[in-house]
Amino acid sequence: MAKAPRCGPYICGIDAALDVVSGKWKGLILWELDAHHVRRFAELRRGLPGVSEKMLTQHLREMEEDGLVHREVYAEVPPRVEYSLTEHGRTLNQALGPLGAWGRERIRREGRELVDTSA
Amino acid sequence: MAKAPRCGPYICGIDAALDVVSGKWKGLILWELDAHHVRRFAELRRGLPGVSEKMLTQHLREMEEDGLVHREVYAEVPPRVEYSLTEHGRTLNQALGPLGAWGRERIRREGRELVDTSA
DNA sequence: TGCGGTACTTACCTTTTGGTTAGTGAGGAG
DNA sequence: CTCCTCACTAACCAAAAGGTAAGTACCGCA
């Protein structure tokens, strides 16, 4: 499933970046990992209200393939797997900063009134 | 169709912003509109290689609802409709700037080698 | 003995998204 | 007279994304 070669001749940078963050939970995963630095699978699951195990695994795997997260498996008695951001993941998060601020503005705007539109 | 109330209690700003730009062509529409300031329907269509009329209309309508684009209809003999960015659309584009830069970096990286990943 | 926690995978199903084709109505080109 | 353009809308389909439920193997706790 997912997309095979992380595909597509991208038309612009936005394209390439959105490809990597599109997915219902990816933004939140990035957020969680940025806030806690290191998280185990079950911790992430508890941190994302409503995520299914399947989607969490799938997103995590895709983000690993994309070089955004690092997956460290400890061969221990109860299995332990720790996820953290790679350098690319951290720079992506920084690039996402202004977008997050814009989004918060939007929430604030919509929370107050729905009108406006005209420039 | 689409999503009724532009919904969802968002968990963070990224969420709210991604909701607005997710859609196969929305990034490109923003890009086109930012570059040309004003574009007609057919011009946009020609500018986005492969877009279907249905999707273009649909995306444009959603972006209008979201207060990102302005739609000006001229009651003329051959119908004329002009699209442009609103103030919110322009600020969104600015917020998208760093993300676009990150994406271009990613394209460059992948174009050269696929390795790396470790922090 | 049986339950819960660990980190998953698999199969199946529903929802969402995007694409295709055709049709609208009026004017202008040939 | 017929086709093309403009800016759409509607009906229908295919593909992708996401959700649900179950199973795996091993451990500790009671």
Image: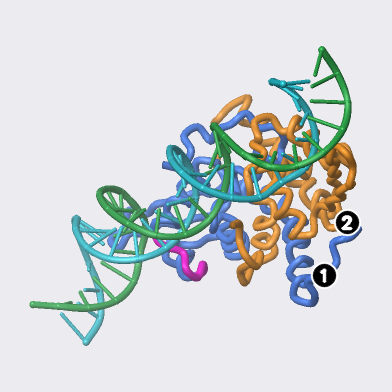
Chain colours: A blue, B orange, C green, D cyan
Decide: is B36 above or below B64. Answer: above
The x, y position of residue B64, in whole percent, is 77, 55
* Magenta part of the chain: A47-53
At a point 69% along the width and 29% down the height, the residue shown is B49
Quarter of the rendering containing residue A30: bottom right
Locate the N terminus of chain B and report the quarter of the image it occupies: bottom right
Can residue B107 be seen? yes
Q: Which residue is mark 2?
A: B87
Q: CA distance from mark 1 to mark 2?
A: 13 Å
The residue closer to the viewer here, B116 or A104, is A104
Disc 2 marks a residue whose amino acid type is Glu
Find numbered disc 1 in the image and state the secondary structure of the residue it sits on: loop
**What percent of the width, then of the height, locates residue A74?**
37, 54
Q: Nearer the viewer, residue B31 or B60?
A: B60
Q: Is residue A94 visible?
A: no
Can residue B18 be found in the magenta stretch? no
Residue A115: mark: 1
Q: Is residue A52 magenta?
A: yes
Mark 2, secondary structure of its residue: helix
For the residues bearing labels 1 and 2, Cβ distance under 8 angstroms: no
Chain bearing tag 1 is A
Callout 1 amino acid: Val
